[in-house]
């Protein structure tokens, strides 16, 4: 397993371990010792399949109410949408940065040891866990179950949009309003007809203009455009999917995530190198379960 693959799980593990006061058998490892564990192995590019080249890049502020019972606490981060001629890619901005750092070190034939600090610094800022690559008819997703990540492919969801009266200004651009229901949530979208890109955050597509703002009516998920720019041909950005994940069905991944949140101790104990003291087991509580797709 490459360091990049290992550290893609690290932020979730750290959060779970700290919040549950779980003792890791390898906890408090000095960064020098951790780096040394990888020896002099050269960094390797992440296995990937390239589908397209990005023409536009849209940066969205992302907010998420992790605990549905606590409306006053939101996780905030940044996500990025890359739009190509035939495909688009949506993921956490810092996940994309981590991919770029890893691959640049690999091309420069740097050692995995050198990757530890720069990868950790960006991956600890990740907020949105899913990666989505959309084509004309299908959607490929990498999704987290809490401690592990799996991939699934599905037909591209066909959103049933209801156009409603109203307009507003987002990022200095006049937007129109549309409503939809998707997998357990009702959403409001503000899209810009003057930006004729029928795309948007996550799996939301099909409006006659780029989605500038999207939020669910419960106030638990929102994406707001921060910037939109063309991608320079001198500095190309590929649209790709990582291929080193085990594949599962969407429904099974959702159930595994639900199971982990209901009993995180069991999930942590299934990991190699994790020890939970007996006296700690009784104090471990379930984690909030509030995925973007409820069904």
Image (tube, rainbow, N blue to C red):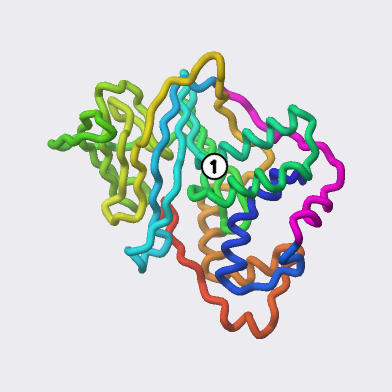
Q: Is residue 13 magenta?
A: no
Indicate whether 2 appears above or below 46.
below
Image location (x, y in percent) of residue 70: 36, 67
Q: Is residue 22 left or right of residue 64?
A: right
Q: Secondary structure at mark 1?
A: helix
Residue that badge 1 annotates: 94
Please give the name of the residue rendered at 30% of the width and 50% of the height, measured from the top-left corner.
216
Hey, which quadrant is residue 42 in on the image?
top right
Q: Is residue 51 magenta?
A: yes
Crowding near pointer 1: few (<14 within 10 Å), some, many (20+)? many
Please give the name of the residue rendered at 65% of the width and 36% of the height, measured from the top-left corner.
101
Indicate whether 261 appears above or below 187.
below
Q: Is residue 286 left or right of residue 104?
A: left
Rendered-image quadrant of the C terminus? bottom left
Image location (x, y in percent) of residue 199: 37, 29
Residue numbers of the magenta segment:
30-52
Please give the name of the residue rendered at 56% of the width and 41% of the height, measured from the top-left corner.
95
Query: Is residue 4 something one can see in this rendering?
Result: yes
Indicate whether 188 appears above or below 135.
below
Indicate whether 196 appears above or below 104.
above
Image location (x, y in percent) of residue 94: 54, 42
Image location (x, y in percent) of residue 128: 48, 48
Please give the name of the residue rendered at 56% of the width and 19% of the height, measured from the top-left corner.
235
Q: Viewer-proximal residue, 222 or 154?
A: 222
Q: Is residue 278 left or right of residue 55?
A: right
Single out the residue that lies furthest toward the left. 165
């Amino acid at each position: 397993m490459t360091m990049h693959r290992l550290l893609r799980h690290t932020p979730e593990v750290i959060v779970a371990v700290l919040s549950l006061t779980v003792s890791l058998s390898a906890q408090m490892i000095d960064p020098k010792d951790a780096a040394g564990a990888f020896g002099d192995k050269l960094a390797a590019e992440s296995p990937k399949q390239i589908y397209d080249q990005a023409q536009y890049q849209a940066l969205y502020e992302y907010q998420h109410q992790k605990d549905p019972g606590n409306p006053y606490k939101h996780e905030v981060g940044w996500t990025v949408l890359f739009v190509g001629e035939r495909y688009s890619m949506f993921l956490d901005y810092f996940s994309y940065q981590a991919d770029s750092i890893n691959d640049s070190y690999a091309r420069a034939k740097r050692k995995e040891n050198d990757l530890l600090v720069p990868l950790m610094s960006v991956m600890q800022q990740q907020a949105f866990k899913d990666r989505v690559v959309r084509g004309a008819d299908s959607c490929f997703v990498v999704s987290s179950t809490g401690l592990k990540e799996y991939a699934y492919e599905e037909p591209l969801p066909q959103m049933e949009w209801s156009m409603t009266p109203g307009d507003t200004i987002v990022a200095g651009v006049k937007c129109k309003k549309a409503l939809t229901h998707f997998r357990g949530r009702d959403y409001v979208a503000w899209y810009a007809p003057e930006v004729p890109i029928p795309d948007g955050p996550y799996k939301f597509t099909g409006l006659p203009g780029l989605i500038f703002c999207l939020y669910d009516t419960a106030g638990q998920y929102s994406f707001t455009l921060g910037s939109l720019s063309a991608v320079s041909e001198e500095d190309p950005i590929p649209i790709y999917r990582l291929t080193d994940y085990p594949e599962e069905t969407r429904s099974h991944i959702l159930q595994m995530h639900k199971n982990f949140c209901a009993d995180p101790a069991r999930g942590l104990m299934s990991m190699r190198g994790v020890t939970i003291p007996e006296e700690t087991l009784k104090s471990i509580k379930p984690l909030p379960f509030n995925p973007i797709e409820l069904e």
